[in-house]
Image: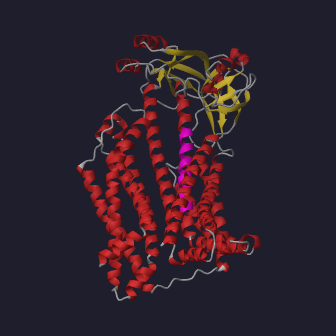
Amino acid sequence: MYRKIIKRSLYNMRDSYLIYILACAFAIGIYGTLVSMSTNPSIKRAIPTWRSYLGDISIMMSWVFAFCAVIYMVYVGGFFVKQQHHEFITFEKLGMQRWVVVMLSFFQTSVIQFFAWIIGLLGTVVFQKFLGMVLFYLMHLRFNFLMYISLADARHLLTVFLYSTIFFSGINAFKTMRILQKGGKRRAKKARWWLRIPAGLFGIVLLILAQVGSVQLIYDIDSIGYSPKPMAEILFILIADVFGTYLVYFGFLPTILNFLQKIRSVAYSGINIFSFKYLKERLFQNISTLWFVTELSAMALVLLTFCYYGYQQVYHNYNTIYPFELSADQNTVKTVRQELKKSKANIVGEYQTDVKISLASYYKESDKTVVHQPMTFMSHSDYLALPKRIQKWNPKVKSNEYLMIRYNSGSINDEPQKAYNIEVKNAPLIAKAKIGNSFPYGSTMHYGSIMIVPDKYYQSLPAEINDTLYGWKFKKGDRLNAKQIKHLEKRRGDYFLKVNYNSNLKNSSIEIIKKEPETYDHNVYTQIGFMRQGGFKKQFNQVGGFFLFIVSLFSVALLIALGSVLTLRILLRDDYQSRQLRTLQKIGVEETEIKGIVRKENTLTFLIPLIFALVQTISASLSFSLKLPKKLLLIYGGYVAMYCLFGVVSYQISWHGIKKKFSQ
């Protein structure tokens, strides 16, 4: 008998359970894939950095993914218990003991978890091969990805299956017990405007404070390594966003719905007499679901936004450090050319620029200190002769203007736009200069800042040291082998500069040291003889591809989660709501009008969280930049398109379920 009861319950909600099982199976398959990838020997062979830190990141992300999946399964699993509310009460009234009803709920959840895990574990095998090939493609690796699940990983997955099934079944059993203890009495949701409106206003205040905190975090993010302030700000922003969003929904959604109900053209026109009241009740009951989906959407959008700006920053720093595939100075250029001739590299571009090195002094606002150091000078015409991709990261400079290029700390916060009163030894004072951070020939080829000056200023500047910098661009790389690279590495520390500071710049001097000094101090600088992009470029592509893989995986998972949450919430109507739609059919309302009611419900349920999440995310993005980049808008557009696709699928499934009930 008990087996038949469980079977009948599963059959009656088969469409909803199928969506839930597939969503859970997807989460299980992704989790199993991330776990097995961490020990896959083909990945370890193909990616040298996998053993050092990428493998650890993969394990960490698998646990983050598992945590998110647990929240999803606990939250959505409660939908089915609520749907069977009257069924459980009826069983008890017919004489079934309470513990038997609770155990029915426990075993019913266990069956669902069993099917989800079986499909998920099979999906792990499929996902591992497919996602492994995608990972290798994104990381620019030409290796064959081999499917592999170790015995330790298999035991781990089976252990998680056992404990998670008991955990989720126990939670649903507990919820069933709570329903039976209340005796089937559902507390009516009252308006309580005296509580809702102040709560909504407080929610708006929390959201505003979260945005203020985001702006402050941008200025404090540099100190995250040694100060607890940035982590405290991140925690505050998270809490303020989560609770602020819920309070706004709790306070203002019922208020808006009641206000609309008083508008005659909205609530008392034609079929709206029936449809608006139905929609109002559905939205009123789904406040917590709308809030949950809003947070999922905001999480996905914020993740995409953070990764976009993070990648832009890393890409910018990469181009700043390595503008050429190979760079050298006048002392190493002969050796570098000899090695390139041996490697038969296909050179498609070669640049050289004369520079002067002198002592300079200026006040640095970010550190609140006066900087005394060697500075490299380059003429304006020589700077314009370099590739445009080097110049595009710096502000435009006219022939009579000055540009100081200095190292960017890597923070999201912009550096000051101008520098003032730069003193140069035996040269006129530079009253004002623009600020840039894209170094010609690479930042490591300069031991301080570099100044782009007008041609006349450059020609009249007395130099402490004259040098020439060289840069090469190749087709398919420089083709240097390990032996050649090892030979060039001996010339990396070309020579050393020791600055002898006195009371002023005029009496200070630079001493060239050919041998490496026994002791270093803040007055000793190293001139790098050559710089090669090749090895770092490979590592950059691999790490960038790996994080793109992780972000894409999480974004797709979040989309599936929020789409299934909303679809299930729409599908799992209680008996009263189903009877309302059935009554409209019986009194002669046309099917197209009932279909319109369902379409409005589906549209509002999907649209409200999307709009709220977009407003939150865009306002947070404006904290980074007052103008949103086109590429970021395209990312948002892609997310909205995928989200709307889930909405269309949800509507089709929902209407199919309603028509099936009408035909019964």
Q: How is the image coloured?
A: secondary structure
| Left or right, 633 with reference to 327 | right
556 shown above or below 599: above
- First to last magenta residue range: 293-313
Whether residue 151 appears in magenta in the rendering, the answer is no
Query: Where is residue 369, by image quadrant?
Result: top right
Query: Which residue extends farthest left?
Result: 151
Considering depth in this image, is 276 or 318 the residue closer to the camera? 276
Residue 513 seen in render: yes
| Residue located 32% across and 63% down the image | 114
Q: How many marks?
A: 0
Compared with residue 185, is residue 442 higher up or lower down, i.e. above or below?
Answer: above
Q: Position of residue 267 (x, y in %)?
A: 71, 73
Magenta: predominant secondary structure element? helix
- Dividing the image into 4 quarters, which one contains the N terminus? bottom left
In-image side of 339 versus 437 (left or right): left
Q: Quadrant of residue 187?
A: bottom right
Of 146 and 524, the residue lying toward us: 146
Is the residue 388 above or below the residue 314 in the image?
A: above
Q: Is residue 315 left or right of residue 135?
A: right
Q: Is residue 53 visible?
A: no
**Observer-nearest residue: 485 or 551?**
551
In percent of width and height, residue 218 lies at 60, 49
| Left or right: 93 in relation to 472 | left
Percent of width and height locating residue 82: 46, 75
For residue 150, above or below residue 276: above
Locate residue 192, reporting x and y percent: 64, 80
